[in-house]
């Protein structure tokens, strides 16, 4: 009996030594247990991007892959080229490849729900990136506080132009972000409108593109025969088109034009003085956050990033909304230094 107990004790000691040694071997080899999914294989995340013709998407792709690689996961990227049906097809293909989580920067906030529903059927978690996917059982949402961005651009403009004619050029109304930005703008300017200090000369939802910005502001100028005193463009794409049109009239530095996203071209225009400000939504923070949440979900863990819940028409979706930063000529160098997204050379010496 004593011999049997002694053998059992010796076996336990040896087993303990072997286990600890094995752990140190794994650590030495750089293997992380948390980088595996429930099946024991490496975590694989699909990132469906709406289109690389959007300047920011190229940066976000790189930052997402960078963070996922640091965590020990693998990323598969697709480009829908602004085609919602192609994005649905790409989503199904990634699900067939066995991704653990899907991150979707949606082309269409309604039709993208088809991808979410198919992922639900396969028990795959889905994160909506930048734009909320509507009317589906979405698992998570990562974006910026776009309503606050609208407040920032309107307040900045009101400080510059407390009286006068305003033009408001919004994005696609089907995109909830476009509505949030416009809501933020009106929160600020409504009191001045009621007092008669501000007149909204033109207010429209259209699209997020430079072409739309160019056409809309050209239409306003040609129809009214005058120039507005301020232009609230809801993103940097619209702002680019507006500034191009104003330049053709020799007015590209004389009228405040807002923007939102903080694209490189917007930073360059702010530096030149053709765009009065942009609302910078750090692509690095947003992409890193999405990668971290995706990795936690794939690992079977509850994400530790949560700002609030946002209702998408079907459920209150757990959401992480990053804080936007106003960038103008006064703080542009400071933002560049702190964000490390662009260099001063890229911005000031393009």
Image (tube, helix red, strand yellow):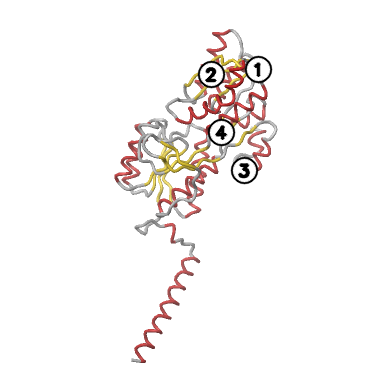
CA gap, disc 4 and disc 1: 22 Å
Q: Secondary structure at mark 2?
A: helix
CA gap, disc 1 and disc 2: 24 Å
Mark 3 residue crowding within 10 angstroms, few (<14) / some (14–19) / many (20+):
few
Q: Comparing marks 1 and 2, which lies closer to the viewer?
A: 1
Of residues 247 and 284, the one nearer the viewer is: 284
Of residues 316 and 31, the one nearer the viewer is: 316
Of residues 259 and 317, the one nearer the viewer is: 317
At x 35%, y 44%, the residue is: 94
Q: Comparing marks 3 and 4, which lies closer to the viewer?
A: 4
Would you say 263 lies left or right of 20 here?
Answer: right
Q: Position of residue 315 (x, y in %)?
A: 38, 39
Disc 4 target residue? 148
Against 23, residue 320 (above or below) is above
Disc 2 target residue? 214
Of residues 155 and 282, the one nearer the viewer is: 155
Quadrant location, the N terminus: bottom left
Specify the label residue 340 is tagged with. 3
Q: Secondary structure at mark 3?
A: loop
């Amino acid at each position: 009996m004593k011999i049997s107990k002694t053998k059992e004790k010796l076996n336990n000691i040896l087993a303990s030594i072997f286990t600890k040694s094995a752990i140190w071997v794994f650590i030495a080899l750089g293997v992380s247990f948390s980088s595996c999914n429930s099946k024991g294989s490496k975590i694989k995340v699909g990132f469906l991007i709406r289109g690389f013709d959007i300047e920011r998407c190229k940066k976000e792709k790189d930052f997402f892959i960078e963070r996922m690689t640091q965590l020990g996961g693998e990323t598969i990227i697709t480009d829908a080229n602004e085609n919602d049906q192609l994005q649905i097809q790409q989503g199904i293909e990634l699900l067939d490849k066995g991704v653990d989580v899907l991150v979707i920067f949606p082309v269409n906030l309604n039709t993208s729900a088809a991808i979410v529903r198919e992922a639900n059927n396969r028990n795959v978690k889905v994160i909506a990136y930048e734009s909320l996917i509507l009317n589906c059982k979405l698992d998570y949402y990562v974006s910026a506080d776009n309503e606050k961005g609208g407040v920032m651009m309107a307040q900045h403009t009101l400080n510059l132009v407390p009286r006068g004619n305003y033009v408001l050029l919004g994005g696609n109304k089907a995109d909830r972000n476009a509505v949030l930005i416009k809501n933020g703008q009106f929160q600020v300017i409504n009191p001045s409108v009621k007092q008669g200090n501000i007149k909204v000369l033109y207010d429209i939802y259209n699209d997020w593109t430079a072409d739309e910005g160019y056409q809309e502001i050209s239409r306003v100028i040609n129809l009214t025969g005058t120039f507005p005193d301020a232009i609230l463009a809801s993103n940097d794409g619209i702002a680019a088109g507006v500034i191009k049109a104003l330049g053709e009239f020799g007015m590209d530095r004389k009228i405040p034009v807002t923007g939102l996203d903080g694209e490189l071209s917007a930073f360059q225009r702010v530096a030149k003085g053709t765009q009065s400000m942009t609302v910078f939504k750090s692509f690095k923070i947003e992409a890193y956050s999405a990668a971290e949440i995706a990795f936690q979900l794939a690992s079977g863990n509850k994400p530790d990033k949560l700002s609030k819940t946002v209702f998408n028409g079907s459920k209150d979706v757990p959401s992480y909304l990053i804080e936007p930063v106003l960038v103008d000529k006064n703080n542009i160098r400071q933002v560049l230094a702190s964000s490390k997204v662009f260099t001063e050379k890229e911005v000031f010496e393009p």
